[in-house]
Image (spheres, coloured by chain):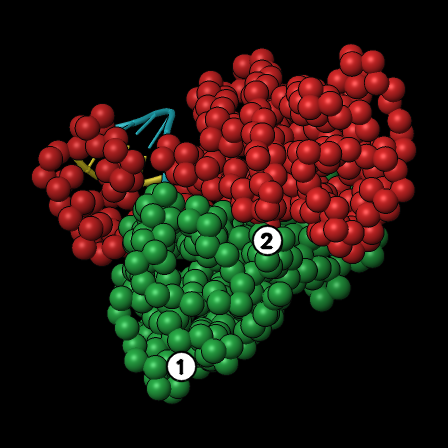
Chain colours: A red, B green, C cyan, D yellow
Amino acid sequence: MKSLSIKDIAVKANVSITTVSFIINGKAKEKSISEAVIEKVKKIIEESGYKPNQIARSLRTGNSNIIGLIIEDISNSFFSRIARLIEDKAYKRGYKIIYSSTENNVDKAKELINLFKSRKVDAYIISPIKGIEEDVQMLLDDGNPVIFFDRNLPDVDTSYVGADHFNASYQSIQSFIDQGKKNIALVTTDINVAQITERHDGYKKALEDNGIAYDDDLVLKIHFNQEENETIAQIKSLLENKKVDAVLFVTNYLAISGLKALKQIDKKIGDDFAVIAYDDHEAFELHTPRISAIQQPLEEIAEAIIKLILNRLSSKGKLPAEELIIPTRLVLRD
Amino acid sequence: MKSLSIKDIAVKANVSITTVSFIINGKAKEKSISEAVIEKVKKIIEESGYKPNQIARSLRTGNSNIIGLIIEDISNSFFSRIARLIEDKAYKRGYKIIYSSTENNVDKAKELINLFKSRKVDAYIISPIKGIEEDVQMLLDDGNPVIFFDRNLPDVDTSYVGADHFNASYQSIQSFIDQGKKNIALVTTDINVAQITERHDGYKKALEDNGIAYDDDLVLKIHFNQEENETIAQIKSLLENKKVDAVLFVTNYLAISGLKALKQIDKKIGDDFAVIAYDDHEAFELHTPRISAIQQPLEEIAEAIIKLILNRLSSKGKLPAEELIIPTRLVLRD
DNA sequence: CTGAAAGCGCTTACAG
DNA sequence: CTGAAAGCGCTTACAG
């Protein structure tokens, strides 16, 4: 069963497809189509359940009302929650979102950009990784709005929305120090992206400002794609072999592995050992004791992203790049 | 800067667009294009970075190599993890996935179906809700493959992949009874969908088979979209006012609210009070004590869905509907 | 071995 | 107040 086309409607209504098109697109008034014709055509569209073929429309107009969202991993709750918020907000403004995960793989990221490009998405929201600078630059050169979020790529001049990772990290370390901690470890990843290095830098600077020497042995860099068991083993080894009285985990999944490690070596969080996780997680509120965390204001981030995108879309990409740094919130628990 | 078209390539190579098209689509051999021409055209495509416009291709061929995935809520980890697995598997077979959330809203679900329809997706994977039967039937009548997962709609005759909710629930209750529990509560939702009612039925049947009377007062139906605080209050009220020595939570987010409720009234899980959650969650392994859970085999479910879809796609929708019920795993912890 | 031409379903500048 | 026609970028049956 083939679906209806504009031509079928035109035939049924005994008018030209031009007329039908004007009516569908709300240009009936402007083109001074008579009320009677408008009514008749609308009725036929209604009854027949006709839906315009968006593919044909896109081919003709060159835009799609679709925004492409490229993230690291949709199964990570930070991204899935952001995705959901962006989806909602875009939807209310008549835009649809299609999203896909890069898995931190440069080739997959490039393929996704090409996929979206070949689908003529109207704009791109990207949590970028190193190695896609050229591809993004080409998008920009072609006049596509591109917004980075969560992470930035310094070599690309486009808008960015992200949390203030440096200060979040700095404040966490400062709060440890205020509690009298001296041997503060950092569990981070070996991914070389700005938002991770900023967290590392905040850690360093806070130590420095408080006259505490930076000790590389207290910084554990976990390899990105490794098995969780190995991560747990490395964290255990850090805690067993070094004197550590506080740990900042740079992502929530590292913190979760860390909590498992603590359980295995039966090390308790309490007065003499403190923990903060970057990005909150349902498990932390529930944990005994409850785990402190840095919260990124997802709602604000999503809203900022959508605003930037819509501005760019309506002004045909002439706007200068903007950087929006959103403050985080440190939630100290128990 | 406009992007290149097949015509640009044809002009540069001094051949017809037909020839270029054959080469792009791997039909060069079959159409006996000379090696020299193939080489020349491929080189030009390579150098220029030309990517065929998929929109034009879709309009012409009528298919898109895109599978639409419609779920309840991408920010729910069950769905985001399934989405990720499906995405991976589809991707390896040359299909892209676009997904969107219904938020359990019939109108939004219908709109999404229309959106995907107007984009000519090749197939639909849907976690359905009541009220969209007609819309799905229309898709099927048009010859589109549609696979339901997680939930089924009895009135629609299409393939389904889902966990064995009835047995999972039955076994959980049986395990409570084996531990000597007598006053077993069920915390469920008021959504009227098969996979929830099956869990309820499993609960009933297990009680019955063990000669325990079903008590409606021990079944708490939480309203779907309510504030978490209210949910917590209702669970607290159940536990404080009734004699309860075991609870099966029918979804993991209800279990999480339940754990918060337990914390607030300081009721401990242990020998005289047991809990099982439907769908595992990172928080459960970490909780003290660890929380037992029913695991759905996500990998198997995703694999089964993709297989069904690809079969249907390659056989042009003549296959009879299949039902795949995947056994779950009850993980008893502590 | 290769190309001209029709057609997918729309939108829109132009003409009347 | 309305319509004929060009064109968006492809694919493919047909012809040579």
Question: What residue is rendered at 83% in x and 38% in y?
Answer: A221
Residue marked by disc 2: B287
Q: Quadrant of the image for the N terminus of chain A? A: bottom left
Q: CA distance from mark 2 to mark 1?
A: 28 Å
Can you give x and y, in whole percent of width and height, for residue B192 in the image? 30, 64
Residue marked by disc 1: B206
- The reply to whether callout 2 and callout 1 are in contact (CB within 8 Å) is no
Q: A91 above or below B269?
A: above
Instruction: Output the chain of dot 1.
Output: B
Q: Which mark is residue A193?
A: none
Q: B225 above or below B252?
A: above
Amino acid, disc 1: Ala
Along the horizontal axis of the image, is B269 left or right of B184? Answer: right
Q: B316 above or below A102?
A: below
Label 1: how many residues lie within 10 Å, few (<14), some (14-19) or many (20+)?
many
Can you give x and y, in whole percent of width and height, for residue B267 in the image? 46, 54
Instruction: Output the chain of dot 2.
Output: B
Closer-to-camera residue (D9/A204)? A204
Count of marks placed on residues: 2
Q: Quadrant of the image for the C terminus of chain A? A: top right
Can you give x and y, in whole percent of width and height, for residue A5 in the image? 33, 53
